[in-house]
Every structure is written in structure tokens, then in C-alpha cells.
Image (spheres, rainbow, N blue to C red):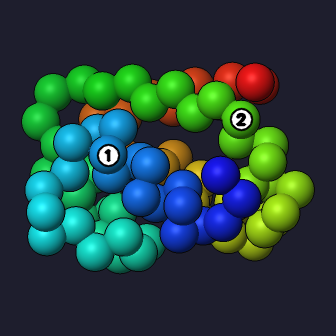
Amino acid sequence: MTSKAEALEAIGVALGFPTWYGRNLDALHDCLTDLSGEHVLVWAGHRRLEAADPEGYRAVLAVLDAATSLSVLLADA
């Protein structure tokens, strides 16, 4: 993925967010807050977004980093 929108969509699919997920940073935060139990998100190819949209990449990572029930593994692909 090379855009913040694509990343938000993929994260929502990977974590099984509900249909009301708005695919923006606020909605990501809200859905991460609602997660029950511990979850691991493996983000393969994250550097493509970092190269294409550094600001969007940092914003998504900041929201993911703030989630208490989520561990994120950044994998190079």
C-alpha cells in the first residue's frame, strides 16, 4: 500500500473492524480502543507507505502505537 487510505482499509480488514469503521485516524483509534484481548498486527511492506507518504505513515503508526491491546510487528517484505 502506498497511501494512508489503503493502510487504514487494510488494517480494518486485518483486525476485523465492524462495517461502521470510517477508515480515518479517529475511527482507527475508536476501533482499537474497542478491541478486547490481545492482538498482533504484522505489517509487511510498511516501508512502501513510509516512502510514498511519510506524514501519513507516521500518523498511522502513532495511532497504532497508542493502542494498549495491540502489538505491531513491522516486517520488511
Check the picture and name the quadrant holding the C terminus: top right
Q: Mark 2 points at which residue?
A: 45
Q: Residue 23, can we see it?
A: yes
Tell me: 49 left or right of 8.
right
| Residue reaching furthest to the right | 51
Please name the residue shown 71% across and 35% down the image: 45
Residue 57 percent location from the top left of the image: 69, 60
How dense is the environment of label 1, judged by Cα within 10 Å: few (below 14), some, or many (20 and up)? Answer: few
Please name the residue shown 52% across and 26% down the image: 42
Q: Mark 1 points at which residue?
A: 13
Q: Are marks 1 and 2 in contact (CB under 8 Å)?
A: no
Tell me: 19 left or right of 22.
left
42 w.r.t. 47: above or below:
above
Residue 40 percent location from the top left of the image: 39, 24
Question: Within the image, what quadrant is residue 7 found in?
Answer: bottom right
Disc 2 marks a residue whose amino acid type is Gly
Among the two numbered marks 1 and 2 on one chain, the one whose residue lies closer to the N terminus: 1
24 w.r.t. 68: above or below:
below
Please name the residue shown 79% across and 48% down the image: 48
Residue 62's mark? none
Disc 1 marks a residue whose amino acid type is Val
Question: Within the image, what quadrant is residue 62 found in?
Answer: bottom right
74 w.r.t. 13: above or below:
above
How dense is the environment of label 2, judged by Cα within 10 Å: few (below 14), some, or many (20 and up)? Answer: some
Tell me: 42 left or right of 22.
right
Q: How many marks?
A: 2
- Identify the element where label 1 is drawn: helix
